[in-house]
Image (cartoon, rainbow, N blue to C red):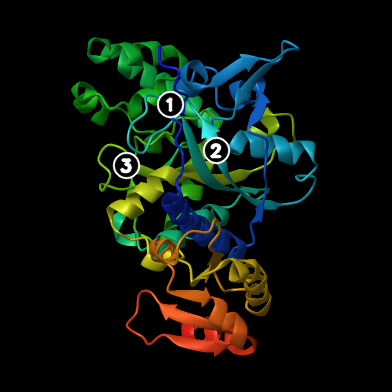
Amino acid sequence: MSNKIQAIRGMNDLLPEQSAQWQYFEGQMRQLVQRYGYAEIRTPVLEQTALFARSIGEVTDIVEKEMYTFADRNGDSLTLRPEGTASCVRAALENGLLHNQTQRLWYQGPMFRYERPQKGRYRQFHQVGIEAYGLEGPDIDAEVILLSARLWKQLGLREHVTLELNSLGSSDARAAYRDILVSYFEDHRAVLDEDSLRRLQSNPLRILDSKNSDMAPMLKAAPKLLDHLDSASREHFERLCGILDAAGISYVINPRLVRGLDYYSRTVFEWTTTALGSQGTVCAGGRYDGLVEQLGGKPTPAVGFAMGVERLILLLDTLALVPEDACPRLDAYMIGMDEAASKSVLLLAETLRDACPTLRIQVHCGGGSFKSQMKKADKSGARLALLLGEDELARNAVTVKWLREDRDQQTLPRQELAAELIELLDISA
């Protein structure tokens, strides 16, 4: 057995270049949700296991197979959160956020599921999501979808994703449809695979989401939930579609879209792409009007979505849609060419940072020959090097040497350096 300590399978390090891509996406998302009036909420990664068993559903794949669950020293069962919605509801209830008021919240952070790692799917993964509480009309469903559509436009993804819609109706309509569906599946029992047979009594709607190609013809002919909706849910869905039509948002109605979490009701949706092969869903959500009451609160309508950050970054990377300037590079690399100058460069850099807060400047530390320092300056990616040596100290000046552009080297008085750099680099003061 190797003594080498490595990252746990399915849990990945984000190296600096990747982190820059993430910061670009997270910046776009943060700016967007703030424009729509959503406030950030942060919840613990560790919750009581009962929270997810009660909300997601005890017979879902997540709870049965995928959660990281353990007993702590007090014997309490704890779970690393596999998704964000249940934690948001728990936090909102516990802290009185839903007391006779509406809330628009957003979150981001790591989630954990014990799945087979593959491209775009990991055991520690990150989600960004929004949740809106206390609003029951189709207008808030539309807002959630419109927000996500605007994000795709900002990222350059609008032509690469497709919106799929369905309605799961009320709990009573779903219960009646469940009986119809079970009867249909019983008549086709010979076609069902082992996983579907297991779900037949516990969660038959999830059979509709099977990817087993041998079952595809049978599933295509299965009774459709949309044909068995209650009148209120049908009206809600039709009004939602009308708003999306008016907004110019194209969509596909997918009667087999049921989502993998038990708390959904009425509207469900997914944004999918064909650019990533089998890992096609990049955002999913819907309405979950019963979840707040299920977790001990008063009946509260709610709707939201979550998107997997790793998968979105992969999509942006695959389509080369991350702007070059999304990975900010250094403006300047400062070098002290001798021992005396090395004592001055740190203080000079601080003076420049005070004068120009947007200036990205790195100081060479660790000594070395001038040649080796210049190699590191070039490797840093900085646009220019600021050189301070014996001559510069004597003249109270700094030499500017361009590293990426064919421009003349020049020596500038220290008192004018900040203003000159702002102009030379075309950056804000």
Name the residue that disc number 3 marks: 280
Q: Which amino acid does label 3 sit on?
A: Gly
Name the residue that disc number 2 marks: 110
Name the residue that disc number 1 marks: 177
- Residue 2: image quadrant is top left
Q: Position of residue 172 (x, y in %)?
A: 54, 28
- Quarter holding the N terminus is top left
- Residues 306 and 29: in front is 29
* Label 2 neighbour load within 10 Å: few <14, some 14-19, many 20+: some
- Residues 227 and 267: in front is 267
Label 1 – label 3 distance at C-alpha: 28 Å
- Quarter holding the C terminus is bottom right
Looking at the image, which residue is at 43% across and 12% down? 201
* Label 1 neighbour load within 10 Å: few <14, some 14-19, many 20+: many
Label 1 – label 2 distance at C-alpha: 36 Å
Mark toward the start of the polypeptide (1 vs 2):
2
Q: Which amino acid does label 1 sit on?
A: Tyr
Q: Up-down: is 264 above or below 411?
A: above
Looking at the image, which residue is at 59% across and 63% down? 36
Looking at the image, which residue is at 46% across and 65% down? 328
Eye-nearest disc, 1 or 2: 2
| SS state under label 2 | strand
- Residues 161 and 277: in front is 277
Eye-nearest disc, 3 or 2: 2
Q: Where is residue 249 in the image (x, y as percent from the top left)?
A: 38, 61
